[in-house]
């Protein structure tokens, strides 16, 4: 453990930011210094007894903070906020737009090098732990087929898409992996799977009074990209039931690989998550990789990094000797 | 991928050494240069078209080899061979005596530093990938209980123990995780489990003619340490059936953790292996971490290392950009 506590800040106080605030209590080597926000600081009610600071004033905190957790979204927040923070602080974020990861890496690398800092990007479980598994298995078993399944879990994007259907008041969509396909892969098969064979979609919908439920169901099931390529089930329920039974944010998933060694010897590797709270688990990942980021920075490393750059010992508060003695 | 192939050697030509020889064909960035043995080199029939060299002559190969895979056993081979090789070559081994890992680390560190090399120890799946999971989960979820189950798989040690029973001609012992306990943990329970509640032992025994089978079964089931603390089943079969159905070396296991975030939110993480061939999978691990060892050495790192020191990208033949573009 570090002699002095790592002084951290949180930028953004949504589900992820709140998760980090809560989980920091389980990590005694870190100390929350302040929370940054784009809102009016006085309007932000936080749990901790630390200052809330407007994002325009972050530069004043440059020397008082070792690490900032960037808790904005990937679509519009991080591409703007990320490079701004990375010039001033070591940062960790959960950037998850796979298709633009290279572009984001380059931007963050430039800023972090300018600021003599590390920008650790795309931490969480996917990208993050799942990426870790895909890289690990693919390296150990060069002849392997690796599958990623998500769920059972709430997809915010799909829930939002349903809410935009005429006559829908509220909705929650669960992505569910197709059990039969999981079973085939676990048995060593390596099928080519369609979207329909990998995931199904289960929707809980609150309809407005007098809405045409048949029409709503049809609109959902035929919605391009979101639902038309999947087996979709629609359940109409009351607002009360939705709030009571579907207001949590569980998620999870599976990385399963079938590899081959020798002459056709099958080797099956599986990693799975069953999370009661997606944002709290993601927060826990950011904290552990935040610890690593600070240590790598102290060792002289600079620039944009991701999970694959991190020697795993740095995410642990244990010493090298404790790791060898108790974990190995 | 490296410009020049990594020149590797194998020390020891048992199951593990043969596995490495076979799996190297799937890793085009490596080239087998020779095989070291303690036996008479002329007596060793190997598959590859490379020299077989006696262990007394390794020093002559010092500058012709980038990396040696040490395939000896942990009990008596590696403690002697390891430090000898580590003075001359970068090495990777699968040292698995958890209780003496610190002592072995110190010895290997001294030798590797003397020789200006890296000695990568305890690579494989346990220690190795399972250690990786235990460290990862324990760091991300400080409030978690982590279980390791082994099997279904052949335990050589237990098979040998049965063979020493009077009247036994041959035997194979399978370690089997207790399904009921796996299920409880997957459901988020965190029970304290006895040895009996974690694993059961299933034995296939070939008895000598006229042997007292009842007595054999009793001796096995009451054998201290090996069997008395477990539910054990003994099946008597013919030598033919044993050879036909039980001559492979499958193994596997589970690392399962129940973590807690927030106020009692359960987060379940599971990693499992279902291996048709234990030695071939272990070989594949040694090769991937061998690649990392050589790269870390080229980067200037020296001394004894284990899985926790390795940035995962080094085990992959992919470039940084390929990793970000295709894996992240």
Image: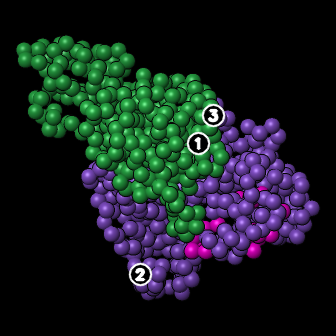
Chain colours: A green, B purple
Instruction: Indicate whether B306 appears above or below B156.
Output: above
Q: Which chain is indicated by disc 3?
A: A
Q: Which residues are magenta?
A: B80-100
Q: Residue at x 38, y 31 (%)?
A: A54
Image spot of residue B124 (x, y percent):
61, 58
In-front residue for pair B323/A136:
B323
Image spot of residue A123 (x, y percent):
48, 39
In-front residue for pair B265/B94:
B265
User: Which corner quadrant holds the N terminus of chain B?
Assistant: top right
Image spot of residue B93 (x, y percent):
69, 62
Q: Which residue is denoted by mark 2 in the rendering? A: B228
Is disc 3 placed on a helix, strand or loop?
helix
Task: Categorize mark 1 by other alpha carbons within 10 Å: few (<14), some (14-19), many (20+).
Answer: many
Residue B95 highlighted magenta (yes or no): yes
Q: Which residue is denoted by mark 1 in the rendering? A: A308
Quadrant of res A197: top left
Q: Which residue is denoted by mark 3 in the rendering? A: A113
The answer to whether B143 appears left or right of B282 in the picture is left
Comparing marks 3 and 1, which lies closer to the viewer? 3
Is disc 1 placed on a helix, strand or loop?
helix
């Amino acid at each position: 453990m570090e002699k002095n506590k790592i002084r951290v800040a949180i930028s953004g106080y949504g589900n992820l930011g709140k998760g980090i605030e809560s989980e920091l209590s389980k990590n005694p080597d870190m100390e929350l210094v302040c929370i940054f926000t784009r809102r009016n600081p006085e309007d932000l009610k936080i749990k901790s007894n630390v200052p809330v600071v407007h994002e325009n004033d972050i530069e004043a905190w440059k020397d008082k903070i070792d690490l900032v957790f960037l808790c904005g979204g990937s679509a519009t927040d991080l591409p703007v906020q990320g490079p701004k923070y990375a010039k001033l602080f070591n940062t960790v974020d959960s950037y998850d737009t796979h298709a633009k990861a290279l572009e984001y890496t380059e931007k963050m690398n430039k800023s972090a090098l300018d600021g003599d800092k590390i920008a650790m990007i795309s931490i969480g479980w996917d990208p993050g732990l799942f990426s870790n598994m895909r890289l690990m298995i693919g390296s150990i078993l060069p002849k392997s087929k690796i599958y990623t399944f998500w769920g059972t879990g709430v997809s915010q994007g799909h829930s939002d898409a349903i809410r935009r259907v005429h006559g829908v008041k509220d909705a929650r969509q669960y992505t569910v992996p197709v059990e039969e396909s999981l079973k085939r892969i676990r048995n060593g098969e390596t099928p080519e799977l369609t979207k329909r064979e990998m995931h199904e979609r289960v929707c809980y919908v609150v309809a407005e009074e007098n809405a045409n439920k048949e029409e709503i169901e049809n609109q959902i099931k035929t919605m391009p990209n979101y639902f038309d390529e999947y087996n979709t089930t629609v359940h109409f329920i009351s607002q009360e039931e939705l709030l009571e039974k579907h207001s949590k944010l569980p998620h999870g998933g599976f990385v399963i690989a079938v590899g081959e060694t020798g002459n056709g010897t099958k080797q099956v590797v599986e990693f799975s998550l069953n999370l009661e709270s997606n944002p709290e688990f993601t927060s826990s990942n950011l904290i552990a990789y935040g610890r690593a980021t600070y240590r790598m920075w102290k060792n002289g490393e600079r620039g944009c990094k991701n999970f694959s750059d991190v020697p795993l010992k740095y995410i642990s508060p244990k010493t090298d000797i404790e790791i060898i003695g108790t974990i190995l």
